[in-house]
Image: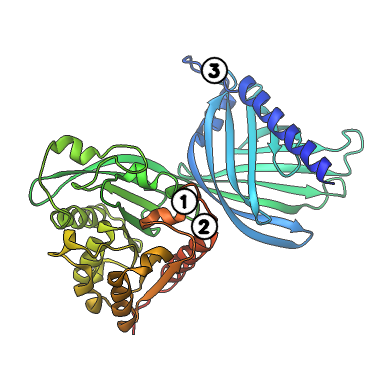
Amino acid sequence: MKLLKLVYKCNFIALLLFFSTAHSQENTYSCKNEAYSFLKQTIGKWHVITKDRTSPGVYENNYGTSVITSSIEGCGIKESYKGVYKGKNYAREVFITGLDSTNVEMLALDSEHGSFSTLNGTINNNELTTYWYRNKDVKKLQSKYIMSFTDTNTFEFSSYLSTNYGKDWALTHQRKYSKISYKEVTMTTKDSVVVYGDLYTINKESPTIIMFHQGGSNAKGEYHSITPKLLNKGYNIMAIDQRVGGSSYYGGYNRTISKLGANSFTYCDAYPDLETTLDYLIKNNYNGKRILWGSSYGAALAIQLTSKRQNDITALLAFSPSTGNAVKDCHPNQYLEHINIPLLLLRPKQEMERESSKEQFKIAKKYHHQTYIAKHGIHGSSMLVKERVENDVQKNWNVVLEFLDDVTSHNKQKK
């Protein structure tokens, strides 16, 4: 059985490389095939919510991210999907080519089966339907995919199975796609500092996580391996480059500092960057729940902002909030008693050997805030990154995601 799975896996990788090479020839000319005008609506990056059949009549809810690009000499599309299925990582590649104005050919390849299927279908009334038959002469066992659009930002691409010649159909995979838009934004603070940020939007009514990095860092460097998992869960993301940071950790560079040039700002001086970011999202109608996420000194300032703007914030995750002399003028502990919304304070086990960390947790518990000590972790948000921790971080993620799910499912006030 293990050998068979290995063979399937090797087949999947080999076929994936073959089709990716053979079917990803980007060209500059426009495709004249009328079917492509339908297919090109799917091009972009998408958040996908799935309902997957695990056995007859039994379904589970999953999620993933899909990237769809133009392919096949510019007259078709290629989908690369990564998600979860049956509790494991799952990948799928789909290639769809327009044969003429209404007919298409579809190749589907996934990591679950390690093989690919060829389907043929048609486009009618802004809906694509493709069919596969185990035996084309008998057609007893067959499956079909249906792609239909709600609007330009949402569509469904689901599959069905029939075991009685197409008389009855059972849903096997329902996939609902919501477009993820990205843009680099700039915001000007009250003291005239231009702050750069990365804004990923699924839907303005969805919850938005607002992320602040640690000292010596920047948004892309610290959070590039964290944001995809949060996007997969359906959160909008805003991550900024504060005026105090750099490229000392995790790569990337701090765009805000790059434009500022040499400066003498302290950690506490960066507070307006956080408040300006919150105001930007409110002004631009991000009306879903807003959750602050801070790392190190970014967490310390996020605690301060939360204490002052609780009507505009749903919850806060504070990873290793700074407690040293660098934040003596904006020490986070003084604000903990004033926060009446959900707050989760997280630190790795080794930091709890310091008296300042013990004191901070003591104060947090006094005011009924949640705390978590990561057995495997390092400073700040990087306790969620396996490569940085060099150990398993799934439990850390479980705590974070359970907290997020709780605060976005219920409009809670702390008692």
Label 3 or label 2, whichever lies nearer to me, is 2
Q: Is residue 395 left or right of residue 345?
A: right
State the residue position of label 3: 32
Q: Are marks 2 and 1 in contact (CB under 8 Å)?
A: yes
- Tell me which amino acid carries mark 3: Lys
User: Relative to 202, is 38 above or below?
Assistant: above
Residue drawn at 46 percent across, 51 percent down = 385
How many angstroms separate mark 2 from mark 1 (CA)? 7 Å
The percent coordinates of residue 70 (x first, y second) are 53, 26
Q: Secondary structure at mark 2?
A: loop
Closer to the eye: label 1 or 3: 1
Can residue 102 be seen in the rendering of this structure?
A: no
The kind of secondary structure element at disc 1 is: loop
Residue 65, numbered label: none
The quadrant in which residue 17 appears is top right
Q: Compute the Cα span from label 1 to label 3.
A: 46 Å
Of 277 and 386, nearer the camera is 386
Q: Residues within 10 Å of mark 2 (few under 14, many from 20)?
A: many
Q: Is residue 254 above or below residue 229?
A: above
Determine whether the residue tagged by mark 3 lies in a helix, strand or loop: loop
Q: What amino acid is at disc 1?
A: Val
* Residue positioned 42% across, 74% down in the render: 410
Query: Label 2 belongs to which residue?
Result: 393
Circle 1 packing at 10 Å, graded few (<14), some (14-19), many (20+), is: many
Image coords of residue 294 (percent x, y): 31, 58
In primary-sequence order, the first of circles 1 and 3 is 3
Q: Which mark is residue 385?
A: 1
Given residues 124 and 279, the one toward you in this image is 279
